[in-house]
């Protein structure tokens, strides 16, 4: 794939216009552009309003887990207009075989690089859920992308090797109610150990695409990385706006006693250019970390993490055991009790950390049971499919 991209980049340094027979449309999502050599595959594309078809721009290749190109592009539009990115999202790639999706993605890369004016030094790749796993795979294995934007999921296990070149930036985005929250926290530790420049944005969301305003903050951070790598000329006005935005968010979170997220917001505004603003943010972080509120919150988060892992292990083990016989050993009484306890915790507004954990575990288990059942249905293992169907009803009854 790397050789394919490089050969095309050298051949098509400047391409005038997206198509020769149509007027270039900017500022709107153009859907269902067919891949030239594979007309059964298509993608959606968005050109920022300033795009003239001649000037080479940065591009973000996006992968949406259900192959909905327009839906995948929507969260990025505000950032694309701010920083002049072309957005491309496959209508064909979706959750499924990695091998199949890699082939689809390569054909997408080839088609777009042949028909658009693309800056070869500014290739980015993004995705949500299963699409984030695909984006992470390409980001870490090819060495041609400047940045990865992974929303709601990280790597497959097979992707976790130290890459030959780790000069890309990895940006994770996750909601604290998302079933993959713990995975993304652990993934950040792995990236830190691999010495890959990375950050993690945490929002008050479930397993959904980030909002446009959050995606703009993500691209603010990527803009800082582009300045540090001399990919884009440093713009002090933009840096001041980024500082003010993150400071405002950090102060709001601190006032709401969300000390860990306040530190997280401060970190997003640090440029590493040793500016006065950098020093102010570092001082604010140090002040928050010394506070009793921050230390208490860290302690509570650690306890919730331990409890969550224990619950996940407990439910997984029981599920695996009962699948072998395709029968509940307690006539589903165990499951009804566990699910009831989680649903009570889910409604406890006085303990938001435990509440968020319950939401994550319930969503994770619901998805696990459903996907496992569908796999048995495809394989015509009807007894195991029936067991999963019954269990799924219990999980979703009042969920």
Image (cartoon, rainbow, N blue to C red):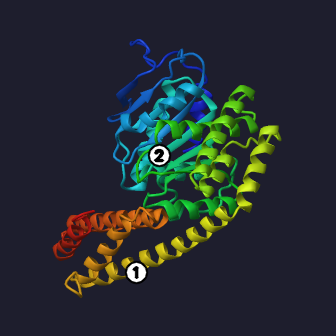
Q: 84 or 174: which is nearer to us? A: 174
Q: Are marks 1 and 2 in contact (CB under 8 Å)?
A: no
Mark 1 secondary-structure assignment: helix
Q: 324 or 107: which is nearer to us? A: 324
Q: Quadrant of residue 84?
A: top right
Marks counted in the figure total: 2
Q: Is residue 350 visible?
A: yes
Which residue is label 1 attached to? 314
| Horizontal relation, residue 253 to residue 278: left or right | left
> Which mark is drawn over residue 18?
none
Residue at image position (48%, 36%) is: 212
Note whether 321 is above or below 339 in the view shown: below
Distance of mark 1 from mark 2, alpha carbons? 31 Å
Note whether 383 is above or below 272 in the view shown: below
Note whether 21 is above or below 398 in the view shown: above
Which residue is label 2 attached to? 127
Circle 1 residues within 10 Å: few <14, some 14–19, many ≥20: few
| Horizontal relation, residue 373 to residue 307: left or right | left
- N-terminal of the pair, mark 1 or mark 2, is 2
């Amino acid at each position: 794939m790397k050789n394919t991209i490089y050969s095309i980049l050298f051949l098509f340094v400047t391409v005038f216009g997206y198509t020769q027979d149509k007027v270039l449309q900017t500022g709107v999502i153009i859907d269902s552009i067919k891949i030239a050599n594979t007309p059964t595959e298509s993608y959606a594309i968005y050109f920022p309003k300033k795009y003239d078809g001649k000037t080479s721009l940065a591009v973000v290749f996006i992968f949406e887990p259900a192959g909905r190109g327009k839906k995948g592009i929507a969260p990025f539009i505000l950032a694309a207009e701010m920083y002049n990115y072309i957005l491309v999202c496959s209508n064909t790639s979706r959750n499924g075989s990695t091998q199949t999706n890699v082939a689809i993605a390569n054909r997408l890369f080839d088609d777009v690089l042949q028909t658009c004016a693309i800056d070869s030094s500014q290739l980015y790749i993004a995705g949500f859920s299963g699409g984030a796993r695909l984006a992470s795979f390409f980001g870490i294995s090819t060495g041609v992308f400047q940045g990865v934007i992974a929303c709601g999921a990280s790597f497959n296990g097979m992707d976790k090797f130290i890459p030959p070149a780790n000069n890309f930036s990895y940006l994770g985005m996750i909601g604290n109610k998302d079933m993959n929250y713990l995975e993304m926290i652990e993934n950040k530790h792995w990236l830190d150990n691999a010495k890959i420049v990375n950050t993690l944005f945490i929002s008050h969301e479930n397993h959904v695409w980030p909002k446009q305003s959050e995606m703009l903050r993500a691209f603010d951070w990527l803009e800082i990385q582009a300045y540090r790598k001399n990919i884009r000329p440093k713009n002090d006005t933009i840096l001041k706006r980024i500082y003010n935005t993150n400071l405002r968010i950090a102060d709001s979170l601190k006032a709401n006693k969300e000390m860990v997220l306040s530190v997280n917001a401060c970190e997003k505004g640090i440029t590493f250019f040793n500016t006065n603003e950098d020093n102010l943010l570092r001082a604010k972080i140090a002040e928050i970390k010394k506070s009793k509120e921050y230390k208490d919150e860290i302690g509570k988060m650690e306890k919730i993490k331990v409890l969550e892992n224990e619950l996940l292990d407990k439910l997984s083990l029981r599920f695996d055991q009962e699948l072998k016989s395709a029968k509940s050993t307690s006539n589903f009484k165990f499951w009804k009790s566990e699910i009831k306890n989680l649903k009570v915790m889910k409604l406890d507004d006085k303990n938001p950390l435990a509440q968020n954990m319950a939401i994550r575990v319930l969503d994770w288990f619901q998805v696990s049971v459903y996907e496992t059942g569908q796999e048995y249905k495809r394989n015509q293992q009807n007894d195991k499919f029936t067991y999963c169907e019954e269990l799924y009803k219990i999980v979703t009854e009042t969920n």
